[in-house]
Image (cartoon, grey):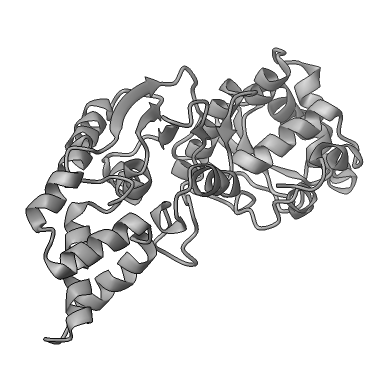
Amino acid sequence: MLAYDPIPVLQSVGYTEREAAFLYLVALHSGYFLRRQYGRFIERERGAIAAQLLRKAMARRHLESIACGQARFVYHLTAKEIYDAVGLAASQHRRLKGDAEIKARLMVLDFVLDHLGGSVLDSAEAKTNFFATRLNMSHSQLPRSSRGNGQLFPEKFPILASDPECPQFTFFDEGSLSTSTLENFLRRHRAVFAALPGFELLYLADTNWNFERAGRLFASLYPRARALGMTPMTPRGVDHFLEYLRAFELSESQVQPITLRDLEVLHEGELIYTTLEHRALCAAWKVGSTSTDLIRQRFEQRGPHAKFTAICVPYSYPIYQLKRERSSEGKLGSSEWSMRMPLFQRKAIENALLTKGDE
């Protein structure tokens, strides 16, 4: 959480309050935006107001434009000082992304604009605080990137938490040809899904191309959690817990050597199976007062209530095969560059950027 309001910080460099608020949303959620999205935010149609923001931000070299053809543009908030000012110095949104990622970020921004004022978990910190602090989950249950530093909630998709008993997760399909990304997302979230009484996945796309395949994939995994015995007590399924009990017994008895897999499961279990009830089950397993069948009966058929909702968003995006015409000089608003440019050419670019917009 920031210890200060970032909006006045942006106002101090010349932005109005609503311009500053919009740029903060862009910095937080997407890094990219369309002209129409600013119009939605201020509840105004195209006109001079949007042009004022674009002119001002590009003159300060805070934005870069990406030409998509047919006089359509995506605007990229690139200025490091803006991200620093709003407490997002480590954000990767200022970095150049590929077409698919840009479209996904634009879709996320539209979703956020649709839910302004709602209970939106909009950052990894907010999500971690909600699930770890409010819902008492361990960090080992939270989705984590398999690369780099193991960042929590790596997809950066917002979560609606209006109902803590059944939060709504989001997945944005930017037009992929397969559901492999969704499958990775679902597997990464298995433990946190299992620890909830229920959850809903909002699958958002601008076409219904993948709806059927995505629905089948979701159905194949959930309510599969019930059959696997994925519960708050056994977030990785009952089979993993049984494997841990056997490895625990071997390590305690020292009758036979344990394998590398046993050591791996023991290490995982030490982070997951930490409650008094887990300890009691370990003790009962050790003395033979419980069994595989009893453990399975205890945890199977108690998984979360899972719901899949496919949503075709009512917005269009001038993305795919972007023809980037980026400027490292911040050309629009640069007096030196403007003086060198022929007048008719300068007027044409200004009209395209500030009048026609993105759509």
Q: Residue placed at 92% from the left, 41% from the top?
A: 12
Q: Is any part of residue 333 visible from this angle?
A: no
- Residues 297 and 191: in front is 297
- Give the total of numbered labels: 0
Q: Quadrant of the C terminus?
A: top right
Q: Nearer the viewer, residue 334 or 86?
A: 86
Is 251 located above or below residue 303 in the figure?
below
What is the quadrant of residue 308 in the picture?
top left
- Image coordinates for residue 310, horizontal then vertical, percent: 34, 24
Which image quadrant is residue 49 in?
top right
Q: Could you say which quadrant of the image residue 224 lies in?
A: top left
Residue 112 in sight: yes
Judged left or right of residue 341, residue 129 is: left
The picture places residue 196, in percent across and down from the top left corner, at: 37, 38
Is 8 on the left-hand or right-hand side of 317?
Answer: right
Residue 95 percent location from the top left of the image: 60, 53
What residue sits 10% from the left and 58% below the top?
Answer: 291
x and y percentages locating residue 41 in the rendered image: 69, 22
Which one is nearer the viewer's eye here, 285 or 27?
Answer: 285
Q: Residue at x 80, y 18 (%)?
A: 48
Q: Residue at x 41, y 58 (%)?
A: 140
